[in-house]
Amino acid sequence: MTPIVQLYWIRVALGITAGASSAVVAILIGNTGIDTLLNSFTIALIIYLLSYYVLKAVYKNKIEKQSKILSTAVAMYFFAWLPFFILFYTMIKIYV
């Protein structure tokens, strides 16, 4: 696999992980309404930015344009985060 493809799939997996962790934090905080979504989105954004710095160190010499590390699969990260956040949040709400 090329480094760009690896970066893509890492971001998808991180989006799923961020969805699960955002759902857990949303349940623990206990807010309802738009506050829950905003807090969860903030957690997902923080995870994305932290992963950027880690991935930048790993892929620094493998990817020519450094801006590609930030922009690759940003949409897939959030498109993976949102349905998995809803899924995990609903599952936790139902079973807890």
Image (tube, grey):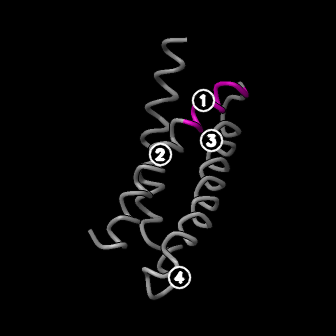
Q: Position of residue 7 (x, y in %)?
A: 41, 65
| Residues at marks 1 and 4 touching, judged by CB atoms closer than 8 Å | no
Mark 3 and mark 4: Cα distance apart in space: 28 Å
Q: Position of residue 18 (x, y in %)?
A: 54, 44
Task: Decide: is 9 above or below 86.
Answer: below
Residue under circle 3? 37
Q: Earlier in the sequence, mark 3 or mark 4?
A: 3
Q: Earlier in the sequence, mark 3 or mark 1?
A: 1
Callout 4 secondary element: helix
Residue under circle 1? 24
Mark 4 and mark 2: Cα distance apart in space: 24 Å
Residue occupying image coordinates x 47% and y 35%: 86
Disc 2 versus disc 1: nearer the observer? 1
Callout 3 secondary element: helix
Q: Earlier in the sequence, mark 2 or mark 1?
A: 1
Disc 3 versus disc 1: nearer the observer? 1
